[in-house]
Amino acid sequence: MSGGVEIDFEEIARQLQEVQDHICQYFVTQTGEQYLEDNWKYEKGNGGGRTRVWEAPEDSETKVLEKAGVNFSALEGSQLPSSASAALKLAPGDPNASGGFKATGVSLVIHPTNPHVPTIHMNVRYFETSPEVWWFGGGVDVTPNYVRLEQVVDFHRELQTICERNGQDYQKFKGQCDEYFFLKHRNENRGVGGLFFDHLDAKSQEGKALEKTTTKEALLKFIVDLGKSFTSLYDPFLRLHQEPYTPQQREFQLWRRSRYVEFNLLWDRGTKFGIQSEGRTESILMSLPAVAKWRYNWLPAPDSPEGVIVNFFLQFQDWLNLSPDLLQRFGLLSS
């Protein structure tokens, strides 16, 4: 309880819907581009969602957002999807494995037109199988084509600040993000990382040293804070949407997007959960870019700007403690 407001499923869904509104208003204000809203019902249970999508006309270079979506959903189903049962390590006879579930969250993916503005993904979510079994999850990560070192460092520094003011462990969540957003079949990172966390509840390992940060109220405050901080996290990147770019840079962007597609279809847990729970396919696959390109066995030259992206920025880095020797090796050390 806090100020007379019970932290139940409906209250969590209400606050997450506010997160969606906050982010969508930011994009409308900053880009002047309006979204298409699609309200839908969950056919396999109760509830539904509100999908908001931006799609630029084909070959449009004037739109800031080539393909973007900010989704909200609040669902109640009678059968726990197999992906969730496996993640919880529930035995077939466990009552929680055969019972119902409630899930609510906000999920977004932004694919800008300009190669100098990175793709960004974020989701904040809540899941429960009973009043006693519940958890929060989510995270945010950036996938650049071209990026400035100071942008990446500032992004991670703000994430550290958000974690610290909520009593959460930035280093742990950063490490989990690096591990999760890794293309095993390519042996490469998807981007420059961020945060990833799952199964945060009153008994989670993350909060044992700081018990007051693992109440349902405190964890909700954390994911809402992260969700509403999206605008300040992404704004320094989005400001570059008028930066000039070449056809060659556009080609590199499309090649980088192919890796994004591969991860989402082969490895992403959210995609698997959505499909297995028979959620709305259009909203689940909203995360895919409008255009991507595969090139056979291609990699950029190591000494090219694209080579620095692949060989430095797409490697595991401690972004808040980079060594001068490493930066000098890639020509990134400021004079």
Image: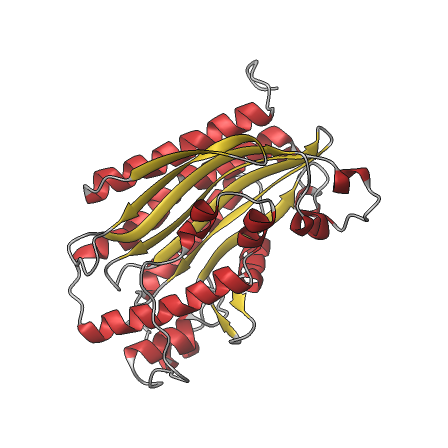
Q: Quadrant of the C terminus?
A: bottom left
Q: In which quarter of the image is residue 171?
A: bottom right
Q: Looking at this view, is 293 or 307 the one in front?
A: 293
Give residue 252's position: percent from left, percent from top. 30, 73
Q: Quadrant of the N terminus?
A: top right
Q: Looking at this view, is 172 or 292 the one in front?
A: 292
Residue positioned 54% across, 64% down in the render? 266
Give residue 248's position: percent from left, percent from top. 22, 76
77 relative to 158, above or below: above
Report how many numbered discs are placed on residues in the image.
0
Quick check: can you spot residue 191?
Answer: no
Q: Looking at this view, is 322 or 217 the one in front?
A: 217
Give residue 191's position: percent from left, percent from top. 43, 65
197 relative to 130, above or below: below
Q: Is residue 286 left or right of residue 203?
A: left
Residue positioned 18% across, 41% down in the render? 32
Residue positioned 15% across, 54% down in the render? 62
205 relative to 2, above or below: below
Which residue of the protein is positioned furthest toward the right in this rendering?
Answer: 93
Q: Which colour scheme is used?
A: secondary structure
Give residue 297's position: percent from left, percent from top. 41, 85
Q: Looking at this view, is 275 or 246 the one in front?
A: 275
Residue positioned 36% across, 32% down in the render? 21
Which residue of the protein is positioned furthest toward the top in this rendering?
Answer: 4
Quick check: can you spot residue 106?
Answer: yes
Q: Is residue 89 left or right of residue 238?
A: right
178 relative to 50, above or below: below
